[in-house]
Image (cartoon, rainbow, N blue to C red):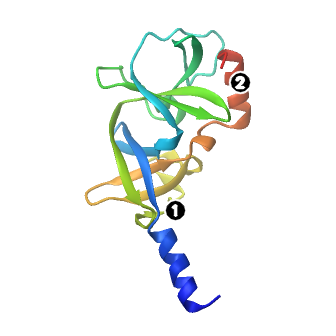
Amino acid sequence: MSEQSEVASAKTIADEVVQLVSFNIGEEEFGVDILRVQEINRMVEITRVPNSPDYVEGVINLRGKVIPIIYMRKRIGMPSKPLDKDTRIIVVEIDKRVIGFIVDSVNEVLRINKSITEPPPTMVSGIDSDFITSIAKLEDRLLILLDLEKILTKSEVDELKKIGNN
């Protein structure tokens, strides 16, 4: 490979722009790829499901589909807090299953350059770094980019298939 094409190849990766939905859980700001987000909803009544894992808050009926709802605070090991007017449900698709995640608040849609991201340290704010793809360094803050495929294990997604009908 010539030096010129190596430089062009490196430039393409560095110039790659990702669109993210940013949201807060506690004091931390997270981001997920916007292409994975189907919709963002205000809190609705959640029906509890007996014998479901502790991080599963229950299910909601979204236009005729029963969708399992994961409380992200519990999932990433943060203490629970009362839900409020800012609380949102981010609806995503994981492994061909539609799942909702409860977050404290949704901030904005961001376009960031991949070049401002770096691999996560082994432990970020007490959150298991297996969930994290990278950390983006923005002007005045850090954004933790989550890997939706790793938030739930394959067996957990299979367990959720029993709860929802999607």
Which kind of residue does numbered mark 2 sit on?
Glu
Q: Secondary structure at mark 1?
A: loop
Q: Which residue is depicted at the point 53% across and 50% down?
A: 132
- What crowding class fits label 2: few (fewer than 14 Cα within 10 Å), some (14-19), or many (20 or more)? few
* Precedes in sequence: disc 2 or disc 1: 1
The quadrant the C terminus occupies is top right
Give residue 87's mark: none
Q: Nearer the viewer, residue 96 or 76?
A: 96
Residue position marked by numbered label 2 in the rendering: 159
Q: Which residue is depicted at the point 61% across and 91% down?
A: 2
Q: Position of residue 11 (x, y in %)?
A: 48, 76
Residue 151: quarter of image: top right
Q: Position of residue 57 (x, y in %)?
A: 52, 18
Q: Position of residue 112 (x, y in %)?
A: 38, 57
Q: Which residue is depicted at the point 63% across and 22% down?
A: 53
Q: Secondary structure at mark 2?
A: helix
Relative to 120, is 164 above or below? Answer: above
Please state if 160 lies on the left or on the right of 117 as rendered.
right
Residue position marked by numbered label 1 in the rendering: 119
Relative to 15, is 49 above or below? Answer: above
Q: Nearer the viewer, residue 150 or 108?
A: 108
Q: Disc 2 versus disc 1: distance between alpha carbons?
A: 30 Å
Q: Which residue is depicted at the point 41% across and 13% down?
A: 44
